[in-house]
Amino acid sequence: MKTKTAMIFTLTGIVLSGCSLPGLSGPSSETVKIGALNTTESMIIGNMVKEVIEKETDLQVEMINNLGSSIVMHQAMLNGDVDIAATRYTGTDIAGALDLEPVMDPDEALQVVQTEFPDRYDQTWFDSYGFANSYAFTVTNEMAEQEGIETISDLEDLAGEIRVGVDSSWINRAGDGYGGFTDAYFEFENISPMQIGLVYDALANDRMDAVLAYTTDGRIAAYDLKILEDDKQFFPPYDTSMVADNQLLRDHPELESVLNRLVDKIDTATMQELNYESDGQMKEPAIVAREFLEQHDFFDEEVE
């Protein structure tokens, strides 16, 4: 995932202070402001949302990229600095914005956010794009075949000898972090916190035997890695949707059908491929977004 640290800190400070983002004071009511996180995935999806709005309506669109976290995105929407959040994740916002206990069933989790967000924040949580960006323990396919590994529980017999790399932010994370993991599964003898972007190379280059990955990362398929089944359903679901401010939808009711065109159109494998096109093949997220829409005839279909 691409990170632009300086920009993140700048935007984070501005948003959390409650001030408007640069260049957006006095916005036109005909301009839709789309917020994207500082991840390739969020920028690709944000550009898809931008493209379909510009294609199907007379509205102008302004992209606000590099928002540092879902909490920053949430605050930006509450402040009116963002009208549409390109990517919101059920598990993240149930624990974060809603401050509720984790919900393990994906359908129930979606129902919770779709009920709570209108009531608390006057926002609409759309149905999922079709993919979930969850945590997942991952090994090489070669190791999986040699050791007969299909699930996380299958790693237990190897937990005392294998090298395990995990996101440094996960190791001390409350709830679904390592502490909770050891309660649900077992402990690893040799576990190393790392930058999340390094774990895939470490696994592919035999510097690690298993790593904690993100399920939509393009390097999973590119490096021939295997995602292990979370057979005890420890990790909450992180199904991905856009969230829109209801005042925007009331002012422009035509938007709802336009935005719904992206619902259930991108499965997890496809999101892996799109992320890899940008991260691995160095295509700009905007180009990846446009090519996906063109390949799937978004510009040839009429909105119902």
Image: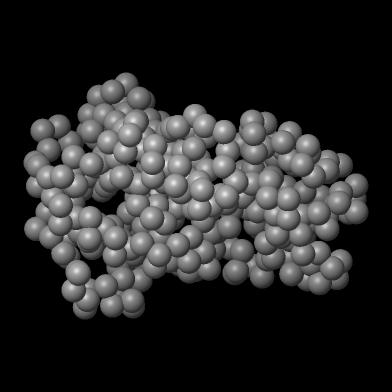
Quadrant location of the C terminus in the rendered image: bottom left
Instruction: Identify the residue at image location x=36%, y=38%.
Output: 117
In the rendered structure, the answer to whether residue 247 lies left or right of residue 203 reads: left
* Residue 32 appears in the picture as rendered: yes
Q: At which x and y percent is residue 285? A: 37, 60
Residue 281 higher or lower than 254, as above or below: below
Instruction: Identify the residue at image location x=73%, y=50%.
Output: 232
Residue 300 higher or lower than 235, as above or below: below
| 3 and 242: which is toward the camera | 242
Q: How many labels does the image show?
A: 0
- The type of colouring in the image is one colour
In the rendered structure, the answer to whether residue 160 lies left or right of residue 286 reads: right
Q: At which x and y percent is residue 47? A: 30, 57
Residue 259 higher or lower than 251, as above or below: below
Q: At which x and y percent is residue 70? A: 43, 38
Q: At which x and y percent is residue 265? A: 39, 67
Instruction: Identify the residue at image location x=19%, y=55%.
Output: 255
Residue 20 higher or lower than 38, as above or below: above
In the rendered structure, the answer to whether residue 4 lies left or right of residue 146 reads: left
Instruction: Identify the residue at image location x=17%, y=36%.
Output: 24
* Residue 89 appears in the picture as rendered: no
